[in-house]
Amino acid sequence: MDSSVSHIKVMRSQLGRARGLGAGGSGTEHWWAERVSAATLLPLSAWFVIQIFRLKGASHDTVVKWGGKPVNATMLTALIITTFHHAGVGLQVIVDDYVHGKLHKPTRILVKAATALIGLLGVFSVIKLVISGVSRKS
Amino acid sequence: MVEFSLPRNSVVGKGKTYPAPAGAKNVKTFRVYRWSPDDDNNPVVDSYEIDLDHIGPMVLDAIIHIKNDVDPTLTFRRSCREGICGSCAMNIDGENTLACLKPIKDVKGDVRINPLPHMPIVKDLVSNLDAAYAQLRSIEPWMKSDSAPPPDSERRQSIEERAKLDGMWECILCFCCTTSCPSYWWNGDRYLGPSVLLAAYRWIIDSRDEHTGDRLDELEDTFKLYACRTIMNCTQACPKGLNPAKAIGQIKELQLERKG
């Protein structure tokens, strides 16, 4: 049959389309991760804002020393990981809503890669703070 | 990608104006969406100037008056005219509701009437709801029980068990909620929509149903259930005052409960 002739392209029954490929078997984890990370970010962000106010006008050395302390470094790392994990799962939802068709999968991969890499950059910056704090002491 | 503008053959034009009869004192203009599959014309909005002194108080009264006395070509669904059949669901003054339950005096200025959004149009104010009906069928909205019923009576429920169905059984499947949901507009081919999820929850919490787990399995999906973004348009739109968003939230909580 000549497919260039104008014709109805989908004749599958509505029930067949509604059932589609069936339930994917996941979704709860993603939804829960969004909520838990959002709730975790509340105290972490509050801590960060307070610390930044306390460091207002501090010298470079003071800030490096502050960042190198185990508690501060732990909190910073937790903040960065949670932020970019939350950004990743949240952006995925936006991509699911707005990007359809062939672009959907590449966009999702892009979001995942970008949030993971920027998050890693943050984590390694904290590691660098810790190491330079140690080297300054000696 | 998301479409930001209407396709060229969907751009709505200006239609005819039907003036009020001479001597009318209490005139209100009804701006009604018109489209027919019988010609190749784009949709238009016709203006009907109606004398409110001679019709009933509801928007549906005005529409019936238009069809009977002004313009018999206007097409719409209606049956019970008292909010129990769900046929006259349409978008009035920017909100999905039942024309028979919407008082004309609640609308300031012209009354804008459109079909339920984002569904294929059959004609004028009649949306095609086949896809939504099929989605309802896909969740199998009937009792599934392996235990035999008592031979001499119906399956019994306690007062508490029966009370759980309140706020659920009142749904008349008008799909005002589903067609008001942006998530359904974006992913209606995979997301079940608030109306169908309310129906699903109604069977999930029915104490007589024995397939609760299977029902939850069928909804464990990033789109079918979790495309709900808690936008809450559904609850705001419901002309029966029900809360589909709450039912969806409770399904999510049950999904979580059985994992933990």
Image: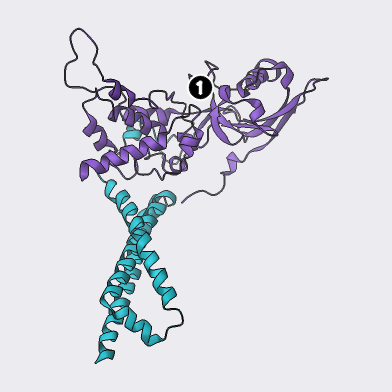
Q: How many marks?
A: 1
Residue positioned 31% across, 76% down in the render: A126
User: From this viewpoint, which residue is outermost toward the top?
Assistant: B152
The residue closer to the viewer here, B137 or B73, is: B137
Is residue B62 depicted above or below B252 in this figure? above
Asked where in the image residue B75 lies, by quadrant, the reply is top right
Say which quarter of the image contains residue B138. Answer: top left
Inspect this view and state whether residue B153 appears. Answer: yes
* Extreme residue toward the front, this view: A54
Residue B202 position, x and y percent, is 33, 28
Indicate the chain on which mark 1 is placed. Answer: B
Which residue lies at the image location 38% right of the left edge and 65% below the top edge?
A: A45
Which chain, by letter, is cyan? A
Answer with left or right where residue A9 lies relative to residue B122. left
Give x and y (percent) for residue B218.
Answer: 27, 36
Residue B199 horizontal side relative to residue B34, left or right: left
From this view, report whether residue A103 is shown above or below residue B211. Answer: below
Query: Can you give x and y, in whole percent of width and height, for residue B78 in the image?
Result: 54, 19
Which percent across, then down, holds residue A128?
29, 81
Q: In the image, what residue occupies the spot 73% across and 18% down? A: B53
Q: How is the image coloured?
A: by chain
Q: Secondary structure at mark 1?
A: loop
Disc 1 residue crowd, few under 14, some 14–19, many 20+, Cα 10 Å: many
Which tint was used for chain B? purple
The kind of residue on which mark 1 rests is Ser
Residue at 33% from the left image edge and 31% from the top image edge: B200
- Residue sitting at the far right: B23
Residue A14 shows in the view: no
Foreground: A27 or B125? A27
Residue farthest bottom in this picture = A138
Which residue has dot 1 on it?
B87
Q: Which of the 4 image quadrants contains residue B54? A: top right
